[in-house]
Amino acid sequence: MESTKVKIEGNFKLKFIINQISAVLICVWMFWPFFNIRGRVISVVLFFIIWLFTTDHRWLNIKNWTKDLFFIAVFFVTFIPYIITKSFRYGDIEPQFILVSFPLFFVGIVLNHYYMYFKKDYTTLGRMALVSLLAFIVGSLQTYIGLEKYPMASRILATANDTMKELYATLGIGDFGYIYSATFISISLLFFLRVDIKIKLIYKVITLLALVLMLLMIVKASYAISLMIVFSGMFITFMIRKKSNIYLYIIFAIILIIIIPKNFIGNMLLSIAGLFEDNFTINSKFTDLASGFLSEGSGQQTSFRLQLYFSSLTTFFKNPLFGIYGPFGNPNYKVGGHSGWLDIMGLYGLFSAIPLFLGIFFNFKKQLIFYSTHQYFKYIFICQCLFVMFGLINPIIYIYEIGFTLFLLLPILPFLPQAFNRQHRKKDELSVKGE
């Protein structure tokens, strides 16, 4: 009897170790471009299958689901009619790519729910956060070195086809999704630089090194919107001191944007462009944006993007229920392809958009409730707001690294100091105390 008990405990421990390793490998695949390319999608699918089989299967009972899991599941169910009728597409992108990238975009919600809310295993979350940051350190360094030699590599990797893509990928250079994932993470890492945060020196070094390398990579990648998100996000975090003031600052910022003179904004953007006079891509982006405030019309690039947003919105109004690919839809209508939220509405209508938006809303709400009395609240809230705005002006739903960042890594970063704790601490025993 005793030997049987020992054997059962040994099997349980082995299963738990395999489960942790598979979860960590999913994080490495997401945040280390070199491993991502070498391992290909089949690797992360295999890691997830192993992870799924080694979990406590009680979590699969729908009674143990939170609202965000339910609505995201409904979101995927809405695609079944499109798949059956062979009308499932996402503009000019290959349907096979979308069928893989959509689940990868939301897989972070599943892992986060299992460890953070179902098992309350904060030690494993700390290990996942630690390994993710180490992967970012290596990946950011490789990307920066690669961009030194090939400045346009990150942009080319985000395009459809190019003869140099394979070379850039094998060098471990991160693409569009990787750069923007680092953008949101860099804002949240400011949390660990607070003087009142008491954690071991090694964690301070890791977070500071990750932050520096990410910022260098972001500047080198020359994504103007990424720089604007970083600057604005960091500025807001420094401005907001207390959680009670965060909503007031947001309202004030909106009013300020409305009443501030257009010439002032235009000249400020030109000044920013001047800081990057040696970087043609960033300089031209800020200059073009500034022209929209300094003249009656918009800059050429800005005007073109506005037309794309408008086309997606117009298409949605003409096909509001099921989009252009559903019944009564007209696939000849154009969707701009440059707004994650508007594009989804235009392509699939409210039928798919409503469960998607509700799933994201309830997930963000769940995370904010968890950190409602914690100093980390403002950092994750600011990143969530910037994510929503980013989804309005850029494609996002199939950029799986960004989804994994927002739904998994951002919520678990405060557990970093618990990576080597032997005992699983309760929520109110976090190493970093709340306010």
Image (tube, grey):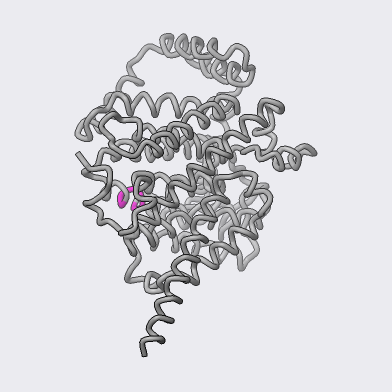
Q: In this image, 380 relative to 336: left or right? A: left
Quadrant for residue 70, please give it.
bottom left
> Can residue 406 be seen at all in this image of the molecule?
yes
**Residue 207 image point, x, y percent:** 43, 36
Q: In this image, 402 relative to 414: left or right? A: right
Figure check: 69 above or below 206: below
> Can residue 346 be seen at all in this image of the molecule?
no
**Residue 219 image point, x, y percent:** 55, 24
Magenta span has 293?
no
The residue segment tinted magenta is 362-366
Q: Quadrant of the C terminus?
A: top left
Q: Main secondary structure of the magenta part?
A: helix
Q: In this image, 308 relative to 228: left or right? A: right
**Residue 389 image point, x, y percent:** 43, 36
Magenta span has 364?
yes
Figure check: 161 above or below 65: above
Give me the residue at 35% from left, 35% from top.
192
Figure check: 32 above or below 283: below
Give me the residue at 34% from left, 58% from top.
422
Figure check: 291 above or below 328: above
